[in-house]
Image: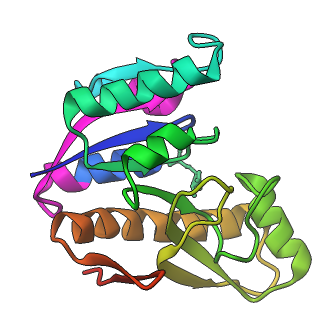
Amino acid sequence: MLKIAFMASGTGSNFQVILDRIRDGRLSGVKVEFLITNNSKCGAAELARAAGIPVYHISGNTHPDPKALAKAMVDIVDQHGVELMVLAGYMKQVPDALLARLPDRVINVHPALLPAFGGPGHWGRYVHEAVVAAGVRVTGATVHFVDSVYDHGMIIAQRAVSIPFEATVDEVAALVLQQEHDLFWRVVEAFAQGKVQVVEGRVECSVS
Ligand code: GRF
């Protein structure tokens, strides 16, 4: 069993889909240990509590010293023996100490085809607004490794979405979210099956 944990700040729909795939048996070989959130009242935290998954609230409020905050995260990862950290809508920077503890084992989903429409300011609805404003005809979802620069780590898997003519920002957001939901759990499955390899700075990953 691959021990996984989540970090989330928002609604938690990607988190819930992964829990659903475990429950319905399509995703096997993983065990969910806990969820870390910087917002104890967010949807993801509520979903975790409802599923009986431990929630750790770690934020600038609970841990004003960044070093203490990083240590708290690393300690929890060590206590649970977590092997893969899954960012499902986590809005804060992941401390370097945690990245160092789990090299090439912290992953994130981003609602665009990186490296386009990523980086500071490109989060949530802003991503889709920028996509529509640019007039591109294709967008999508990217699962990537997390490094110390926002939306910058090596790309693991992507799904493209064609943008219908005159689609609204909300319509684009919904189409992309649908693809995130179908892709993210498959990448987690690939990790569980040992089907993700980093070879000379590139990622080899076969998703089902
Ligand atoms: C998703 O669009 C994801 O790409 C981004 O944050 C959003 C989280 O949505 N990183 P949800 O909380 O999983 O519904």
Q: Quadrant of the C terminus?
A: bottom left
Percent position of residue 151, x then y? 65, 62
Query: Residue most toward the right?
Result: 133
For this rendering, which residue is in front, 182 or 36?
36
In the picture, residue 72 is in which quadrant?
Answer: top left
Percent position of residue 32, x then y? 22, 40
* Residue at the (46%, 24%) spot, across then down: 71
The reply to whether the magenta stretch includes residue 71 is: no
* Residue at the (69%, 67%) spot, across then down: 171
* Residue at the (14%, 55%) spot, across then down: 24
In the picture, residue 59 is in which quadrant?
Answer: top right
Percent position of residue 146, x then y? 53, 57
Above or below for 82 versus 79: below
Horizontal side, residue 191 vs residue 135: left or right: left
Above or below for 194 versus 39: below
Could one spot residue 48 in this view of the protein? Answer: no
In the picture, residue 29 is in which quadrant?
Answer: bottom left
- Identify the image's colour scheme: rainbow, by chain, secondary structure or one colour: rainbow
Horizontal side, residue 92 vs residue 36: left or right: right
Could one spot residue 117 in this view of the protein? Answer: yes
Number of numbered discs on residues: 0
* Residue at the (15%, 48%) spot, across then down: 23
Percent position of residue 27, x then y? 17, 61
In this picture, which residue range is highlighted in magenta? 21-47
Above or below for 199 versus 152: below
The reply to whether the magenta stretch includes residue 40 is: yes
